[in-house]
Amino acid sequence: MSQFSLLGKRRFAPFFWTQALGAFNDNAFRSAMVMLVAFQMALDANTVSLYTNLAPALFILPYFLFSATAGQLAEKFEKTRIIRYVKLFEIVAMMIAAIGFFTHHVSLLLVVLFLMGVHSTVFGPIKYSILPQALSRSELVGGNGLVETGTQLAVLIGIIVGNSLMLIAGYGPLASSVTTILVAVVGYFVSRSIPVAPATAPDLRFNWNPLTETMRVLRITREDRAVFNAVLGISWFWFFGTVMIAQLPSYTLLHLGGDGSVSTLVLALFSLGTGVGSLLCERLSGRRVEIGLVPMGAFGLTVFAVDLYFARTGFATVTKLDWHGFLASAGAWRVALDLTMIGVFAGFYVVPLFAFVQSRAPADRLSRVIAGNNIVNALLICMASGFGIALTRWGFTVPQIFLAVGLINVLVAIYIFTLVPEFMMRFITWMLVNTLYRVRVDGLRNIPEEGAALLVCNHVSFMDPLILMASVRRPVRFVMYYRIFNIPVLRFVFRTARAIPIAGRKEDEALMEAAFERIDEALADGELVCIFPEGALTRDGAIAPFRPGVDRILARRPVPVVPLALRGMWGSIFSRRDTALHRMRVPRRFWSRIELVGGEPVPADQANASTLETRVAALRGDHA
């Protein structure tokens, strides 16, 4: 089922449109305000510069002040009720904005800008914490992709509409006021269709002190190292995006020689690219939370940011080109491609990170983790503004700023992936598995979302652990033959996944005993452990008898057992049939169609080697 089918479901569609309408109004109001101040009021250049630089700071200030409080609200109370109050707040803010538009009262408009920052701050934790309540895990990536795409398009349309309405001769303030109030009212009525989203922590003790609560929220955000580093990755995305987008007006004027229509085109390419990348995440990830896309996204951001520098290093020789004239100029399509692809890889980068935080953070703390994420985001956005201003004052041209942020992106990515090797491990796994196979999964919902369980699977090829690793959403501890564990390159993947090497009693009894100890410790800690009870790769495609090691594990630690079966692997690359005498099979079985299927969990008191062998054989059937 396509992710677009979510737009027809009540559990998602009203929230999607409420979010999109809010993003539209934020940007329509801000753009109309800038147009009023910059083009319709008799203000000197210094005053205009003061207001336009003060505006982003006022909008972002509530994120520092109220994010922690907003996170508490989203967890302690039912979410849809808060959303409706937020939308009513937006209607009042837009009515105040109308007074400011008609009276040209800039200070009042700045107050409204602060109020809209409060609106976005309160809505932020709900925006991402409500999705795991409304969607299944397999829908999270697609749902996030749709929300990100809808947001990008709403922002773009809001900017264009806000600019256009305020510039209507004689009727700009009226058109802007009516539109923003009407959109806020529509948003409120749409929000009333959002299904109930119960409080995830109704007994939470509310802390009204924003300073101490901010510190507590940041501590909660840092509790899970992988989640916190995902938050750092998201915040870096905002830093990167803020620097890039802030330079686009100057880049359009000085280096592309374009007018306002080119500026709109440039922003549209960036926004549409992000939307496309966000939507592609579901297809590329197989509807799973696939953080392996994050390194690919980071790599693409650098490649195209650096290429954007080389596309136009000098100043434009012609000026005031409209968008038709720009696209007809030399090298324009290279610039357009770079901007679009930066957006596409930004989608690959940020959507899996949001889905990862949603799936990994505890449900009763997710809203506060999102609030912590928003605080860190706000800090990085402010740093990005200072970074851009500093480089400009030091004499950097806009293309040089693109080059600088592209190269810094490499260092940041290396830092994050070094702190959490799981990101790079998943990338390598995702690339290998999706290059060599076309995998279809079924029945993996039988794997419990939480708590200990033992997974048992038939063993056909050296790639079996990687296929399971790429398909199962939860981290899995694999028990594998120590010689496979030590394969070059894959050793990094297996060590990062904390696989457990094992040997036969006659080969290394000490290693075998150590392996059983580590298996028991992992299960005691509530982890998933996967074993291949045949003990070796099949030599003829048939399932070999299961060894008694599984009985020993369950006797010491009785946990549910989930049988898994790989289908279609026999004769594929890296299976035993792919030997020196059968190399001619490789081209036919390269990018093989294979399946991973899961069966119903077997209680520990009913599980033994013989029973599990029968279950796995039945799951595999005749699809060797």
Image (cartoon, grey):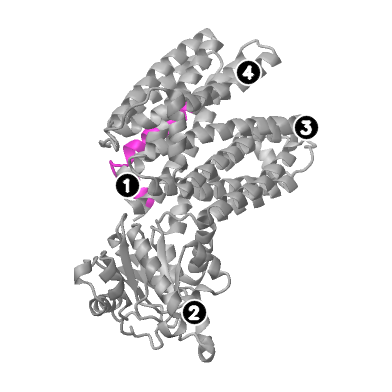
Q: CA distance from mark 2 to mark 3?
A: 55 Å
The amino acid sitting under disc 4 is Ala
Mark found first going from the N terminus, 2 or 4: 4
Neighbourhood count class around disc 3 (C-alpha, 10 Å): few under 14, some 14–19, many 20 upward: few
Mark found first going from the N terminus, 2 or 3: 3
What range is drawn magenta here?
3-26
Find disc 3 in the rendering and name its residue: 394
Quadrant for the C terminus, please. Answer: bottom left
Neighbourhood count class around disc 1 (C-alpha, 10 Å): few under 14, some 14–19, many 20 upward: some
Image coordinates for residue 277, horizontal then vertical, percent: 51, 49
The answer to if 609 sits in the magenta stretch is no
Q: Is residue 259 visible?
A: no
Mark found first going from the N terminus, 3 or 1: 1
Q: CA distance from mark 2 to mark 4?
A: 64 Å
Numbered disc 2: secondary structure = loop
Quadrant for the N terminus, please. Answer: bottom left
Find disc 2 in the rendering and name its residue: 573
What's the residue at 31%, 29% (across, down)? 205
Q: Do the numbered discs 2 and 3 sit on residues whose CB atoms are within 8 Å? A: no
Neighbourhood count class around disc 2 (C-alpha, 10 Å): few under 14, some 14–19, many 20 upward: many
Q: CA distance from mark 1 to mark 2?
A: 36 Å
Q: Can you name the residue that lies furthest to the front here?
A: 510
Q: Nearer the viewer, residue 316 or 459?
A: 459
Q: CA distance from mark 3 to mark 1?
A: 48 Å
Find disc 4 in the rendering and name its residue: 38
Q: Nearer the viewer, residue 62 or 484?
A: 484
Q: Is residue 558 visible?
A: yes
Q: Name the mark on residue 453.
A: none
Numbered disc 1: secondary structure = loop
